[in-house]
Each structure stands twice: as C-alpha cells, then as structure tokens.
Image (cartoon, grey):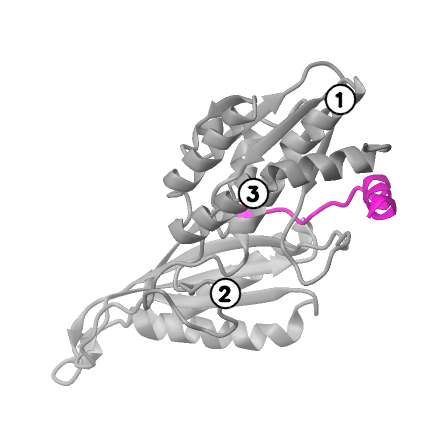
C-alpha cells in the first residue's frame, strides 16, 4: 500500500496514464494551429468531464480555451497546458529524422501534444490524492490555446480568469527532468505594411515607389541594429507579402513580419521603438507610406523562487 504523498501520487498516475497517453497520441495526429484547436480542446474537455471536473469553455472569449475545476476550499492550484501545433512541422511518429506525414503540413515540433496531456494528467492525480488525504484545495486545469505566437494567456489574464489563483504550475517537454531557470524573453510580433506606387519597371521606373525596396531596406537596417542591441535580445523576420511575382513591375505593396524579443518588458518596448524607427527610415528613403500592427505580445517570465525550490526538492 502507498505510504506517502508521493507514493499515492505515483500510484494514481500509473492508474490514469493509459488514457492520457492516448490523448497525447490523438492530439499528435490532429495538429491544429493557433486558435483552431477545436478537436484537441474537445478531447481535453471530454477527459476532464470523465475525471469529474467542472468544465468551462470559451474562457476570455477564446473558443479553444478550457478550464476544469475540482475540489472546494483551500488554495486554488492551477496547472497550465497547451495543445497547438506549428505550421510546416509535419512529422511521422517514432522517427528520429525529418520525415513529414504531409509536405508543408502542421506538426507538434515543440511537444504540445505531450504538454496538454501531461499537464492534464497531473490535475486528476493531485485532485484524487488530496481527496484521499482529506486535504482541502481546488485543482484547476487551464487549456491555453495559441501558445505559438497567439499569446492566449495574455488575453486570459486580461479577462481575469487567473485572478483567484494562488499557484500556477506549467510544464514543457524537454530532454531532462528538472526545474527550468525562469527565463523566457518578453516578445512582440508586428507586421510592417509598406504602400507605394506601381509602375512598369522598364518603361517608367521613375514613376514607381517600391514597397519591396522598403522591406529590403528595413531588413538591412535592422541587421545593422543587431550590433547595438543587448546581447540577450533577439530579432527575427519573415517577408509575408512581396507584392507580386513579376520582376517587371515596381511593387506597390509589401509586408514584413517581425518578432522582437528582449530580457525584460521595458527593454523590449525600447527595442521595438528602435525597430519602428528603422521602418520609418526605410519608408522615407523609398517615399512609401508605412503602417504597422501588433499581432501579439508577452511579458518576460517572472519566477517564483520558493515554489521552484520546493518543486526541485520533491524531484
């Protein structure tokens, strides 16, 4: 018979694990991206209900956000899970080399099929152990969609869904078992849209104002900026709209998407402003107009040292 809290947890996890391994496999096969995780969240919801949790869907107005709660009284312990896939990372299971199921398809390259299922397994295991020991506490599983660039947790925080939470625990698949250093950079994802004037590139190039030139000049300017930003900062970009496919046309529109990261939120906001200045300079040089839009953003991770030390001791 189990003789300690850890023994009780281990025994309950062993009893439950088959259903949650099956959930992980199902989510692996589903591969839904940002805010489109309808099948994945339905599978998580069904398992929460099966395990006796009170389930709420559509948190913060997000159709693929779910929360299951069990227990009453005591502290509110939140366990966070995710289940979104990444585009272009299709992969056959059990193969340790790139081998897509479908070329260009979605895939769980970051292990989110495990992240949701493993975190969800912890919730009933802790719930049942507390009940067996007569300890008060409310266990909540939060299924958080769109971690890969959609920043759902920010919308959930703004809507107050974590306001009464005492402890929030997260987990991510990795190559080792341990408590990670609380380092996750603040980030901001923005689109920079340039608008110019189309013209025939051979007959009347002087009449054109190239938005594609503006994108290229912005990228060059940001690459020069890298020498003069903090060593912990990161900037990535992707040209999402070149304006067209004909080299004989001066492109009247073009868009580049930037993901900017820095160690703290104040450092990030300062760096974003510098990137915007580079974009403004590119627009000025090409006589195009510029519009930018923020797609998503996250503050840097703030660690909970006492909780981390407690988790490390138990591990």
Circle 1 is placed at which residue position? 132
Q: Based on the displayed image, in which of its 4 quarters is residue 192 positioned?
A: bottom left
**On screen, residue 73 above or below 68:** above
- Give the residue at x 77% y 45%: 303
Q: Secondary structure at mark 3?
A: helix
- State the image coordinates of residue 313 (x, y, percent, origin top left): 88, 46
Q: Are marks 3 and 1 in contact (CB under 8 Å)?
A: no
**Does residue 218 appear in this view?**
yes
Task: Please state the extent of the stretch shown in magenta in the rendering.
Answer: 297-315
The quarter of the picture where the N terminus appears is top right
Extreme residue in the front direction: 1
Residue bearing the label numbered 3: 18
In the image, residue 197 lies in the stretch drawn in magenta? no
Q: Is residue 165 visible?
A: no
Spatial CA span between label 1 and label 2: 37 Å
Going from N to C along the chain, the mark reached first, 1 or 2, is 2
Q: What residue sits 56% from the left and 26% below the top?
A: 51
Residue 16 location (% of width, % of height):
61, 37
Residue nearer the viewer, 137 or 287: 137
Image height check: is 81 above or below 30? above
Q: Which mark is residue 94?
A: 2
State which tag comes first along the sequence, 3 or 1: 3
How packed mark 2 is, by other alpha carbons closer than 10 Å (few <14, some 14-19, many 20 or more), is few
Which residue is depicted at the point 50% across and 24% down? 49
Image point (60%, 42%), residue name: 17
N-term-proximal mark, 3 vs 2 = 3
Point out residue 253 in the picture as x, y percentages from the top left corner: 27, 64
């Amino acid at each position: 018979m189990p003789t300690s809290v850890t023994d009780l947890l281990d025994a309950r996890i062993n009893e439950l694990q088959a259903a949650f391994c099956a959930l992980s496999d199902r989510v692996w096969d589903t591969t839904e991206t940002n805010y489109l995780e309808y099948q994945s969240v339905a599978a998580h919801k069904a398992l929460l209900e099966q395990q006796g949790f009170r389930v709420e869907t559509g948190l913060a107005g997000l159709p693929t956000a779910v929360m299951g709660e069990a227990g009453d009284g005591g502290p509110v312990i939140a366990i966070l899970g995710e289940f979104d896939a990444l585009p272009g990372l299709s992969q056959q299971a059990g193969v340790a080399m790139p081998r897509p199921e479908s070329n260009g398809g979605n895939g769980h390259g970051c292990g989110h099929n495990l992240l949701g299922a493993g975190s969800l397994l912890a919730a009933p295991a802790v719930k049942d152990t507390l009940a067996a020991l007569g300890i008060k506490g409310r266990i909540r599983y939060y299924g958080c969609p769109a971690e890969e660039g959609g920043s759902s947790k920010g919308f959930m925080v703004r809507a107050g869904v974590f306001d009464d939470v005492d402890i929030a625990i997260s987990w991510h698949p990795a190559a080792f078992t341990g408590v990670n250093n609380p380092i996750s950079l603040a980030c901001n994802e923005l689109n920079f849209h340039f608008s110019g004037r189309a013209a025939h590139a051979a007959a009347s190039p002087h009449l054109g104002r190239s938005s594609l030139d503006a994108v290229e000049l912005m990228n060059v300017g940001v690459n020069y900026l890298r020498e003069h930003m903090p060593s912990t900062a990161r900037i990535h970009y992707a040209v999402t709209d070149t304006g067209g496919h004909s080299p004989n046309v001066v492109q009247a529109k073009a868009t580049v998407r930037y993901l900017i990261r820095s160690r703290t939120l104040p450092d990030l906001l300062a760096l974003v402003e510098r990137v915007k200045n580079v974009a403004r300079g590119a627009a000025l040089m090409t006589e195009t107009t510029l519009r930018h839009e923020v797609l998503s953003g996250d503050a840097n991770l703030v660690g909970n040292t006492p909780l981390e030390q407690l988790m490390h001791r138990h591990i």
